[in-house]
Structures are given as structure tokens and as C-alpha cells.
Image: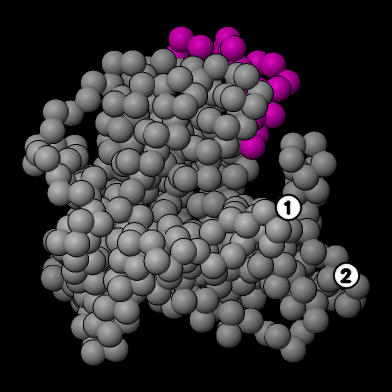
Amino acid sequence: MRNYFQFSERNTTYKQESIAGITTFLSMAYILVVNPVILSQSGMDKGAVFTATALSAIIGSLLIGLIANYPIGIAPSMGINAFFTFTVCIGMKIPWETTLTGVFIAGVLFMILSLLKIREKIINSIPQDLKHAIAGGIGFFVAFIGLKNAGIVTANQDTFVALGNFKSAPTLLAITGFIITVILLHRGLKGGIFFGMVLSTIIGVLFGVIETPKAVIGKIPSLEPTFGVVFSHMDDVFSPKVLAVIFTFLFVAFFDTAGALIAIASQAGLMKNNEIPNAGKALLADSAAATVGAVLGTSTTASMVESTAGIAVGGRTGFTSVVIAAGFVVSLFFSPILSIVTPEVTAPALIIVGAMMATEISRINWSNVAIVIPSFVTIIMMPLSYSVATGIALGFILYPVSMIAMKKTKEIHPIMYVLFLIFIGYFVYVI
């Protein structure tokens, strides 16, 4: 097994990979609580969505770990599940069954694009500076999510964002966890992020901030309300409105995953000669998980940026993903225990990981104006638009414009022109 996962080549151990897998799982575990809550507002059965969420995460994480040997966790994407419920089902009044069928069709298209290696070619055509911008931008985005989950940053009607209530017990717990984690990391503890979350959870329970679970083992909810629904609603998707929704699922998931994969490969030191090894296999695993997830009964899955938490503590191979999958298997039976891992507990990990990822921007050629503008827009628009895909789209629109203005057209890959037109069309006709 050590040879299969290339432990020696990637300088890692079972212990290191296991701690990384547990850390990523705990950072992702909130999805088991949040995803059912969001999708149930579209009319879906909350229990069935919980089981579908766990199973899709198990399948996706195993696929990307065993096939591509990447330390990545796959689960339903937070941005896409909100789009599913609030924009499509509630806003456009499209039934959840039809919307889920749209997710399935988008997943199948993902797989076709992956098998044809079109997705891989697109990712490898992205200029090195923009890849650093994507990785750094996701760092700011991840940190912003952590600050929001901690209650350190809150919404404000006048200034959009403001400092939260530092007298709030959950916020104080997050701040305490952040300080503990920083101290552990400065002391050279490799699993500092993981142990910081454990200590935060214990402190939260002791001080009554986190409710002590009333049970240890819970019954696994049935999949019957959602399983296979997509196959009985195929005739409902051939309207212009639903086709536009399918394209949006395809677009957002494609570039959310591409951005996450670039950031993760860069942070783990796996990128070589501006290319991501086994990118095709990773993308195929991701698209397969999205397709299976739709059949089970959940919105589009994606490579989770929270995987960077596990990479930060040493995850380098697909064995990390196997451990992540094992965590989701256990969660099916121990959902009451899982409920005590609150957003405030995982927030410090996201803030610290975001800071680590943000260092990627130091590798951008800031002396080149043609690179500076699209890179900056890519970085800043991810947290401000709360979307990795939007940041990438805007940066990719500006990149050819900037390069043409600087008379550097020979340096632009032909695929970047195609993406430029696609992104323009996306903002004009879909957004």
C-alpha cells in the first residue's frame, strides 16, 4: 500500500496521512449538517439528503484517492446547494425533482468532458500567474468563510461587513481555538490544526457552548424519498429555463473544482511544469461523484477547498482521501456525535489554512501590469462575490484584454480566447 500511494516519493507516513484525513474530515463534516438543512427548504427530505450527502462524499473521496492519488475530500458544494434551493427551486419555481435531474445531466456532461480530456486541457492552458492568483484567492475566500463561521465578521446594512459580537460565547470559542491552534503550530506540532479543533470542542462542551450529545449512535435515514428520482423526470428538463440552469451547474461546478484542484495541488507541491499530474483522473473522479450524488439525492459535489486543512498538516497522497471517506462512513452511524463539531470549531482551521494559501500571491509577477490586473480581480472577487467560479471568470475575461493591450498576443493560449467568449456569454445571458 505504501508503494501504491507513493509514500516515499511524497515524503509521508501512515500517521501523517491519517491525521491529515481526520483533519480534513472534521473541516468538511459541517456539510452533513448544513446540506440537508439547505436542500430541505426546496422540499427534499432532510433525512434522505443527509444519507445522500455522506454516501456521495464516501464515493467521491475514495475515487479521487484511489484513482488519482490526491489528498482531496469530495462532497456537495456549499455554493451550489444554495443556488439549487434559493435561486432555482424557490426563485425560479422549478421543482426539486427537475432541478436534481439537471444536476444529473450536468454530471454526465462533466464525465464526457473529463473522458475527452477537455477539462484537463483547459486547466493546463491557464497561465502560471493566474494559477497562483486562483490559489491565493481561494485562500482569502477560505479565510473569509472561517471568519464568517466564527462570527468575527458579520453582515452590516451600511458597510456590508463589520466586526461581530466578541462577547458572544461561540465567537469567543472560535477565537480561543484560533489562539490555541496558532500556539500549537508555532511550537512545531504537525497536527496542530487537528488538535486545536479537538481542544476547542472539549472546551466548548465544558463551558456549555457546545451541547453535549444526547446519544452516541443514530439510525441511518432512508434514501427512498430521493434515490433514482432523476430517472423519472428526464422529460422536464428540455425547456430553455431549465437548460440555462443545467449550463450554470456545469459552469460553476467546473471552475469551482478547477480552482480547488489548482490550489490544492499547488499547496501540496504536486504541480510540475505548470501542469497538474493525473489531473484527468482527478477530474473524472470528481465528475463521477457528481453524477452518483444526483442519483442518490444531493446537489452537485466538488473537490472541497477544506482539503487544504489536511494538506496543511501533511496530507500528500490518496490515503488521506481514504481516511476522509472512512470518516464519512463512521458519520453515518454516529451522527449525534458529529453534531457537536460546530462551525465555530472548524473556523480557526479555515482561517489559518487561508493564510497559508494566500502566500501563493507572492509568486505572481507583480511587476507586469498585464498580469497584475486580472490576478488582482481574480483574488479579490472570490471572497467579495462569495464564489470561486465568479473570481476565475472575471480574471479570465480581463487576462486576454490586458495581454492584447500590452501587445503580448503570442503569449495567450488559444483556449484562453475561447474561455473569454464563454465567460462573456455567461455574464450576459445567465447571471
Q: In this view, does 89 lie above or below 392?
A: above
**The magenta stretch spans residue 242:** yes
**Left or right of 131: which side holds 312?**
left
**The magenta stretch spans residue 305:** no
* Residue at mark 2: 404
Q: In this view, does 344 lie above or below 127?
A: above
The residue depicted at 37 percent of the width and 33 percent of the height is 36
The amino acid type of the residue labelled 1 equals Leu
Query: What stretch of residues is rendered in magenta?
Result: 231-248
Residue 20: percent from left, percent from top: 24, 66
Residue 201: percent from left, percent from top: 21, 61
Q: Is residue 87 above or below residue 338?
A: above
Please tell me which residue lies in front, 183 or 105.
183
Quadrant in which the C terminus is drawn: top right
The amino acid type of the residue labelled 2 equals Ile
The residue depicted at 46 percent of the width and 10 percent of the height is 232
